[in-house]
Amino acid sequence: MEGRRRKGLWHKTMYYFIVNAASRTGKGKKIWRRLKLELEREHVPYRAYLTKYQGHAGELAEKLTEKHRGETISLVVVGGDGTANEAVNGIRDFSMVRFGYIPTGSGNDLGRGLGLPKDPLAALRLILASKELYAMDLGKVSWGRRLERSAYFNISSGIGMDAQVCRRVNGDGLKVFLNKLHLGKLSYFIKTMQTLAELPKVRARVRFGDGEKERVHSLMCMAVMNQKYEGGGLPMAPGASDQDGKLSICYIHGVKKIKALCALAALVKGKHVGFSGIEIQACSSCEVWLQEPMAGHMDGEDLGDLVRLRYECLPGALQVMK
């Protein structure tokens, strides 16, 4: 398809779209129709691949990047944070991919962190007009007793309460029901209250960067942040940057549950920095040893119950069109 000049743009780049039409409780399908009309109206060369099951976005990204090995391709994800995570983990050579993201999920913490428009058409136009690429850091989490497994994250990874909340939110129909009422964030609040009441406190050892191992008593949760927000807009790390080559690690420990509830109330308002029992540490890597297993997650995806983890920052790994 030939490109043409329109509104100052010269469309001759082929764009490959990975689309989760089921995102936002099925509204993703309608959103994709609008985007298709815009692409065709602007005579933009594109190919689209619709996901059919969990993990499919990663398989599609892997096949596309393998097929075009040695070529730079423009890969655009239309979906939620989970779809974006799958796609990034399917990419085999980040240096050969220009990555675009059109957030259509319920949480949209990646879009929020990148400052992308909420309107999908506006996000598409931003991608098509992109000239300079935004070099975004990626996080990498490794787990297992010998750290034999690993994956990348765009937003955050963590253990304890936030991971348990993600597991519960994704494990029942409450989020789907509340999404239909435009109250999706309420599901996180409800599950957080339930989880806090039952959450065990675990002893841990932590090493930040190249420092010495530190003992952490009564660890309730640890959120390793690449972006400022997780859980649908929770400002877990207000000072985080996805371009500083560091991860912002927020952890709650050594407090009674009633005080933890107060800490969470402060966290929701972004006023938890300096709160007793909440610490934030910026570092390029972090290693964690747990005395007992804790739930783990990566961009909201369940990693199972873990006892050893390593986190590291990959500076400027993802080249984003924005």
Image: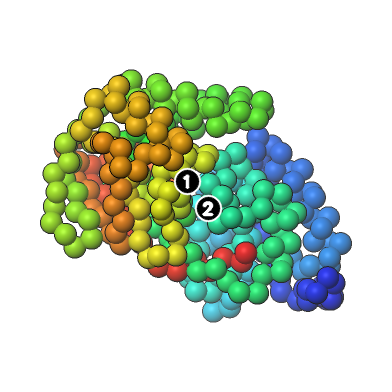
Q: Tell whether label 2 touches label 1 (CB within 8 Å).
A: yes
Judge the density around disc 1: few (<14), some (14-19), many (≥20) Cα neighbours within 10 Å: many
In screen coordinates, is 39 left or right of 63? right
The reply to whether residue 48 is visible in this rendering is no
- Residue 277 sits above or below residue 228 on the image: above
Residue at image x 54%, y 79%? 70
Residue identified by numbered label 1? 229
- Residue 316 sits above or below residue 118 on the image: below
The reply to whether residue 290 is visible in this rendering is yes
Residue identified by numbered label 2? 113
Q: Amino acid at mark 2?
A: Gly
- Residue 136 sits above or below residue 113 on the image: below
Q: Nearer the viewer, residue 64 or 179?
A: 179
SS for dot 1: loop
Where residue 91 appears, as percent x and y from the top left, is 50, 63
Judge the density around disc 2: few (<14), some (14-19), many (≥20) Cα neighbours within 10 Å: some
In screen coordinates, is 273 left or right of 87? left
Q: Nearer the viewer, residue 154 or 269?
A: 269
| Residue at the far bottom in the pictured view | 70
